[in-house]
Amino acid sequence: MFGSIDQVRHDLLRTVAQLCAAAAVTAPKSGGQLFLKGKPLFIETAFVDDRATIVRLADWMRARGKERRQEIWFRDAAIALKIDAALFIGLKDWYPPIYDCGACGYATCAEYMSATKALRAASAALEFAGPQCNLRDIDLGIAVGSAAKTASLHNVDTRCQTRIAVAARKLGLIEADVAVALAMSVTHKNVGFDNRLPPTDFAAPELASLPATGALPVKNADGRWAHAPQLEVEE
């Protein structure tokens, strides 16, 4: 016999997360012919369901919210503490589809990769590394949508989130340049539904102890963006 939903939640979420990861990997990708020629996959997936790690992710988001002086990070941190698990889906070691589509503003993929190489190398301190190929970002969106559809088919609630994915990247849980998280829960109502921005006093004493995240940019108390150290791309 099955136990209560609380008793089976762990195994249920892991099983559905595996199906979602498979859906993300097998979702249509631009330049599919490259895979037939032996090119490696560039979709990374990682699953987190232990409470200690989820608390670490929420704490990082709160610290980042203080740095950016944005309430939305505190909202997403509160949501993170309510979810049961998170499946991260991202672009890792991607390569262009060789379509030469021009969506990036360059005539060819080769020109784009060459022209943006230094900028990508200098973006390590940012929340996500970039710039990214437009078609690869579309591929990521299709992969995330396919995974969310799979979760829905199995009646697991999800919410597509980027800020918790930033936290996962900065904490070393994923290596992707850019990622999206499927925040997963099995409750009476989706915990990600109808969450409003919390009023936040960024000068409150309890926020003073939050550590620096090391991510850029940050915002000064006067509301101006600060880049320390300033990102520079060598000519």
Image (cartoon, helix red, strand yellow):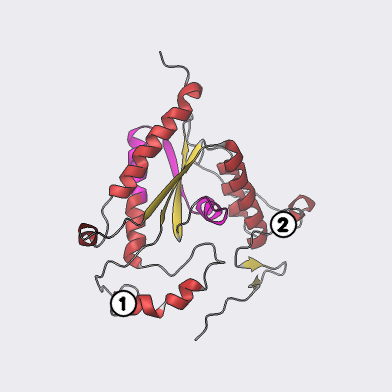
Q: Earlier in the sequence, mark 1 or mark 2?
A: 1
Residue 105 seen: no
Query: What residue did someone put label 1 on?
Result: 110
Q: Is residue 109 visible?
A: yes
Question: What residue do we see at 33% from left, 39% from top?
Answer: 150
Residue pictured at 47% horizontal, 27% vertical: 9
Q: Where residue 208 sits: x, y (%)?
A: 76, 55
**View extreme (right): residue:** 205
Q: CA distance from mark 1 to mark 2?
A: 45 Å
Q: Residues within 10 Å of mark 2 (few under 14, many from 20)?
A: some
Left-right relation of 214 to 20: right
Which residue lies under the disc numbered 2? 202
Residue 168 located within the stretch drawn in magenta = yes
Spot occupied by residue 119 in the image (x, y as percentages of width and height): 47, 75
Q: Residue at x 61, y 52 (%)?
A: 61
Determine whether, in the image, residue 74 is placed left or right of residue 234: right
What amino acid type is highlighted by mark number 2?
Phe
Q: Which residues are magenta?
A: 144-173
The image quadrant where one finds the N terminus is top left
Is 48 covered by the magenta stretch? no
Q: Quadrant of residue 39?
A: bottom left
Of the numbered discs in the image, which one, if any, rests on residue 196? none
Q: Nearer the viewer, residue 36 or 100?
A: 36
- Left or right: residue 133 compared with residue 198: left
